Image (tube, helix red, strand yellow):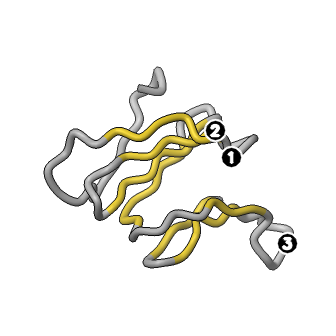
Amino acid sequence: MVTCGNNCPVLFWDCDIVDPVDKIDYPYKLVTISVSPSGKYVAMGSETAEVLLFEVATKKFVGRYSSHSDTITKLKWSPDEK
């Protein structure tokens, strides 16, 4: 499971462990988060009108997309992970 919140990191959880197993720090408020259908990527929508993309296994930053004019409030993956 992956969670995000206001002024806190993106946290990765294992249902068998009480504490988060990993995290990604981001300095602004994240409003929405979505894991790709394969579980390979996580996309995050921020109050700064950016969508950030990370590879889940490595936490490697893949890209930042900022063509929106306001806060990203919802993300949805297509079946082919676009």
Q: Nearer the viewer, residue 80 or 50?
A: 50
Tag shown at residue 59:
1
- The kind of residue on which mark 1 rests is Lys
Query: Looking at the image, which residue is at 41% across and 65% down?
Result: 30
Q: How far across and down, in percent of the image, does residue 32 sit?
A: 39, 60
Residue lying at the far left in this picture: please name it. 69
Marks 2/3: CA–CA distance: 22 Å
- The kind of residue on which mark 2 rests is Glu
Q: Earlier in the sequence, mark 2 or mark 3?
A: 3
Query: Looking at the image, which residue is at 72% across and 65% down?
Result: 13
Marks 2/1: CA–CA distance: 5 Å
Q: How far across and down, in percent of the image, does residue 70 sit?
A: 17, 56
Tag shown at residue 17:
3
Provide the secondary structure element on which disc 3 rests: loop
Q: Quadrant of the C terminus?
A: top left
Provide the secondary structure element on which disc 1 rests: loop
Residue indicated by mark 2:
55
Asked if 46 appears above or below 68 in the picture, the reply is: below
Q: Which quadrant of the structure image shows residue 71?
A: bottom left
Query: Looking at the image, which residue is at 68% across and 46% down?
Result: 59
Mark 2 vs 1: CB contact within 8 A: yes
